[in-house]
Amino acid sequence: MPKRMTYAKSGVDIDKKSDSIAALVDHLRFRRRGLGKPIDLPGHFTGLIDFGDYALTLCTDGVGTKLLVADAMRKWDTVGIDCVAMNVNDTICVGSEPIAFVDYIAIDRPDEHITSEIGKGLDAGAKMSNMTIVGGEIAVLPELVKGFDLAGTCLGAVQKSMIITGERILPGDVLIGLPSAGIHSNGLTFARKILEANDVGYKDKPKGLRRSVGLELLEPTTVYVKQVLGLLHRVEIRGMANITGGGLRNLLRLKKGVGFIVEDPMEPNPIFDMLQGLGDVTDQEMYQTFNMGMGYCLVVPEQDADQALKIAGKGAKVVGHAVGGEGVELPELKLRYSKY
């Protein structure tokens, strides 16, 4: 039997990460006044800035150790999509439309082939998001990095009257899940450690996968921009969550005083079944680390659910509903999360 593995034992303790974030944020006390002042929405997926009748949104994220898989596979043409997706999917959580993006590459030595391949993915992600990449930076830092790191920042805009905060969520509202393409760009350290512990190489094709492990891990993060923007003016959306690091715990960021029951979760992608089996990982750990087949979640009034499903298209499904109290429960697996 494989030794039971956890994300923390792999080197990433998400609770300690949250504590570290809190320690940093505790010192960020200065607030600009007037045009450009912040619109406080603590704990949400993107920052908001007052800009007259509009709010600008700003968020930043990277690709993480998925880049190590790209290096091992010598395949860098899709990680730019991941970089864009991780940012734009956070941007749309408040109803904001992505409009501009900048990227940042820190690399140990200049490599035209690698940066050219990264550029292909960045452009593809920008096209999927109807967004311009207006600038960026390549920093050559041989004393700080080994290989390269890729991150980006997204600027979005939303009319103030259209901001979606989650505050309108009520018990009885319906959760609609949108399918993920796979592991996306979270939990890759955990996934890699599971594979290493079981001597599974990236070129291997274990039972249950339709292609090599490396290609499964490199499947680009789904960009939900056009799908979500297509819903915004046609149905009432009361809250949205990008299901990234933290898994189902991301729903806890939407509104205090409301809970969520996930009675009919989406079918996990085969990569998750493989990783869970190899690492003897508990359900509790899987659903608080990976997206487990649901990459994005919307909260809508019950009367809008059927219309939302029609517009969202293939793969979208009702996965649960909002309830009184707090926390996220998955009764089928006897799981409950009360802390983000």
Image (tube, helix red, strand yellow):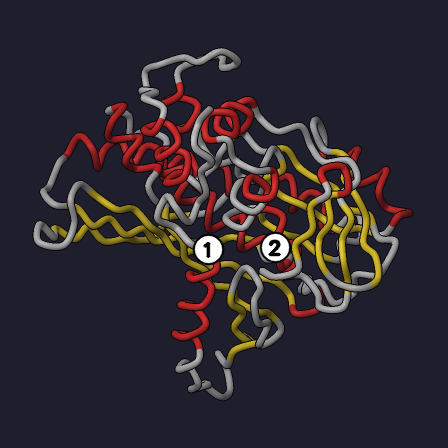
For the residue pair 87 and 53, the one nearer the viewer reads as: 87
Looking at this view, is 6 or 173 the one in front?
6
Q: Amino acid at mark 1?
A: Ile
For the question of whether residue 311 can be seen, the reply is no
SS at badge 1:
helix
Q: Going by the image, does 231 lie left or right of 45? A: right
| Relative to 145, 183 lies left or right | right
Q: Tag on residue 206?
A: none
Q: Identify the residue at image location x=58%, y=64%.
A: 44
Q: Residue at x 65, y 46 (%)?
A: 229
Write the residue at 57% across / 72% down.
Answer: 42
The crowding category of the residue bearing disc 2, from other C-alpha atoms within 10 Å (few below 14, some 14 to 19, many at least 20), is: many
Image disc number at residue 93? 2
**Which is nearer the N-term, disc 1 or disc 2?**
1
Camera-side residue of 30 and 145: 145
CB under 8 Å between discs 1 and 2: no
Residue 89 in the image: state x and y as whole percent.
Answer: 54, 48
Secondary structure of the residue carrying tag 2 is: helix
Residue under the point 35% across and 35% down = 193
Q: Residue furthest front?
A: 1
- Up-down relation of residue 279 to residue 24 (above or below): above
Q: Position of residue 108 (x, y in %)?
A: 12, 45
Residue 192 horizontal/vertical position (percent): 36, 33
Give the mark count.
Answer: 2
From the viewer's perspective, is residue 143 above or below residue 200?
below
Three-letter residue code for mark 2: Cys
Foreground: disc 1 or disc 2 = 1
97 over 71 or under it: above or below: below
Toward the right, the furthest residue is 303
Residue 14 bears which disc, if any? 1
Query: In the picture, which quadrant includes the C terminus?
Result: bottom right
Q: Quadrant of residue 265?
A: top right
